[in-house]
Image (tube, helix red, strand yellow):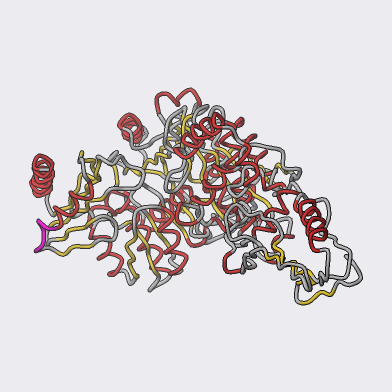
């Protein structure tokens, strides 16, 4: 600007002694060119003009420079209103995946003009949003609806190729990369090990196509990827801790049959990512950011963790009394007694992982069931299905096995049957394993599913432990175990969590602990279970109900004389029986889950009939 210009606290002032109109026209033209980005306002002459630059508080963002011109002498006074400068407390914009870093409208606008990689698809991209035609908005709404349907409270699940398409996989990978990288602080952002994501899959059909798209999305954020191939989900958690990565993604449909696929996402040290811990943020980023070229990329490394994982699992076998005669010799392990077991892989990834871990353990004889890929249509990846459970029972009896185990599709949960082929409930297995841990660490915390038998609480106390009941969901159990430094945890779906496994679930470690228990006691599984299986239950059942919340209030009022808890739904307790009624996340709105336990089978049947009748009568009167 001219020599007469003086800068005073972000203001530029000029005097206009005469010929105001000509100066006004010149200044107006200059400011219009400045607004279009070509240059700054420039005015010659002996004048004082106050130019206040501020940022609009409106969400639209941009505005012209506000001006104040004071004319002296015969000239008139001209004033243009000026909005206040945007204070930092009013910043609300942020780049996808960096919600903790709020931006001013001006910085946001500057990044858009500089074609910043994260601007494409961003919810604050005013320029992009204004340019989208109505028809595209409608198409985008349909895509968003499909994509949003994939996100459940604790994971991602859908059928391939729709709605879980390769485009959706790219979006989820890009969103997860942005979110997990955004959690890093300080020097961690520059550490190549920490700035990486571990990716694995459960080996089912079409998993590779989804994995390729997912990795492409992750790389587009500049994050590196470590591929560990076909693994069980617990091995992915192990890999995240082993490499010190900022997180991991396992492509798996779990216990669901084809064409279902999904993704389980974890942060550093295997900490679970669920709706409450980041999955909602990943969903929002995935909805906003379409597949596009970002101008940045990471690197991909492929590695095999079989040796490290095998050593990790086998090291939980007890140390031998004589390392030469009966113990470990190099990589050889020997059980203290012979064990014969049946392993039902349910045509899942356990068919690959179990032999890798346990082949060569002296004293262990295992018999495979549903290990071939073509068994998928028969086994359907769920050990609790009647066909799988009956096949396991028959195989245990045929092979005169000490016990049998059945894994789900990604081998993060399992079911046990005893030597008679009788199903042993997960809460009873958890009680046996908890007592074993408490023998070695008295006073330790044990975290378990609140639906467990009331006897579990009593047995943990009797063994000198601290029982902690928790809501249904692996996220809640892991979080509580971490906070309370619990040595062991379990839930009713057959997941078993271990402190020395980063508080994550690991079905293979549960098998190791059961082998250790039988070897140490020299007893049969049925004999160990019998003293603690004193109560009866039919497990968790599903009941139709039009209005779940209203039903919960009605049942609560009808049992005012009982002890009532509201940890997860409602739990009603009487001296000789109790029940839990809840509406789990992801379940149909017209469905409630009920679990009832009593001293005798007859009492279970009577109370369950009463409860179902009460729910039915309430529906009829609604």
> Furthest-right residue in view?
3
Q: Quadrant of residue 322?
A: bottom right
In the displayed structure, would residue 274 be above or below residue 81? Answer: above
Part of the protein shown in magenta: 557-561
Residue at horizontal 69 percent and vertical 58 percent from the top: 106
In this orientation, which residue lies closer to the viewer: 238 or 104? 104
In the displayed structure, would residue 279 be above or below residue 51? Answer: above
Residue at horizontal 32 percent and vertical 62 percent from the top: 469
* Residue 37 % position (x, y): 79, 51
In this orientation, which residue lies closer to the viewer: 621 or 538? 621
379 relative position to 363: left or right: left
Q: Main secondary structure of the magenta part?
A: loop
Say which quadrant the C terminus sits in: top left
Q: Quadrant of residue 621?
A: top left
Is residue 366 among the parts visible in the rendering?
no
* Residue 373 % position (x, y): 50, 26
In this orientation, which residue lies closer to the viewer: 94 or 227? 94
């Amino acid at each position: 600007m001219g020599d007469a210009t003086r800068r005073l606290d972000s203001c530029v002032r000029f005097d206009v002694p005469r010929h105001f109109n000509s100066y006004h026209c010149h200044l107006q033209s200059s400011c219009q060119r400045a607004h279009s980005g070509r240059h700054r306002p420039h005015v010659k002459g002996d004048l004082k003009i106050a130019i206040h630059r501020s940022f609009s508080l409106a969400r639209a963002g941009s505005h012209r420079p506000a001006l104040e011109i004071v004319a002296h002498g015969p000239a008139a006074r001209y004033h243009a209103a000026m909005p206040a400068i945007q204070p930092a407390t009013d910043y609300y914009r942020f780049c996808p995946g960096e919600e903790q870093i709020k931006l001013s409208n001006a910085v946001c606008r500057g990044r858009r003009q500089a074609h910043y990689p994260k601007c494409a698809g961003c919810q604050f991209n005013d320029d992009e949003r204004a340019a989208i035609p109505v028809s595209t908005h409608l198409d985008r709404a349909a895509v968003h609806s499909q994509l949003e349907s994939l996100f459940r409270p604790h994971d991602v699940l859908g059928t391939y190729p729709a709605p879980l398409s390769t485009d959706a996989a790219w979006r989820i990978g890009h969103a997860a990369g942005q979110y997990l990288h955004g959690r890093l602080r300080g020097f961690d952002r520059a550490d190549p090990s920490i700035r990486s994501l571990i990716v694995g899959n459960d080996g089912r059909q079409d998993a590779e196509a989804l994995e390729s798209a997912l990795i492409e999305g992750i790389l587009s954020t500049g994050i590196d990827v470590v591929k560990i191939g076909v693994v069980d989900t617990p091995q992915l958690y192990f890999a995240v801790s082993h490499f010190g990565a900022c997180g991991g993604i396992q492509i798996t449909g779990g216990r669901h049959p084809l064409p279902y696929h999904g993704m389980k996402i974890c942060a550093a040290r295997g900490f679970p990512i669920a709706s409450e811990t980041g999955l909602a943020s990943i969903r929002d980023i995935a909805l906003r950011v379409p597949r596009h070229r970002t101008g940045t990329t990471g690197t991909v490394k492929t590695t095999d963790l079989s040796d490290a994982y095998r050593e990790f699992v086998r090291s939980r076998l007890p140390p031998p009394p004589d390392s030469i005669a009966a113990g470990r010799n190099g990589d050889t392990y020997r059980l203290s007694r012979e064990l014969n077991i049946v392993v039902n892989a349910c045509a899942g990834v356990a068919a690959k992982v179990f032999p890798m871990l346990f082949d060569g353990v002296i004293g262990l004889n295992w018999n495979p069931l549903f290990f071939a890929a073509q068994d998928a249509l028969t086994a359907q990846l769920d050990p609790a299905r009647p066909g799988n459970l009956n096949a396991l029972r028959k195989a245990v009896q045929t092979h005169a096995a000490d016990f049998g185990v059945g894994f789900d599709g990604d081998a993060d949960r399992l079911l046990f049957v005893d030597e008679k082929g009788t199903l042993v409930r997960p809460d009873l297995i958890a009680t046996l394993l908890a007592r074993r841990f408490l023998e070695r660490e008295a006073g330790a915390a044990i975290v378990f599913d609140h639906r467990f038998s009331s006897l579990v609480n009593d047995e943990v106390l009797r063994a000198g432990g601290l029982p902690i009941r928790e809501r249904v969901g692996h996220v809640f159990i892991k979080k509580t175990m971490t906070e309370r430094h619990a040595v062991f945890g379990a839930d009713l779906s057959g997941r078993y969590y271990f402190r020395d496994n980063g508080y994550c679930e690991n079905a293979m470690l549960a098998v190791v602990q059961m082998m250790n228990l039988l070897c140490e006691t020299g007893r049969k599984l049925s004999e160990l279970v019998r003293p603690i299986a004193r109560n009866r239950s039919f497990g968790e059942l599903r009941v139709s109900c039009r209005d779940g919340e209203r039903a919960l209030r009605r049942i609560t009022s009808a049992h005012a004389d009982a002890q009532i808890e509201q940890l997860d739904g409602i739990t009603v307790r009487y001296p000789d029986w109790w029940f839990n009624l809840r509406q789990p996340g992801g379940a149909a709105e017209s469905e409630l889950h009920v679990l009832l336990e009593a001293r005798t089978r007859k009492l279970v049947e009577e109370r369950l009939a009463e409860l179902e009748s009460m729910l039915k009568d309430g529906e009829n009167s609604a």
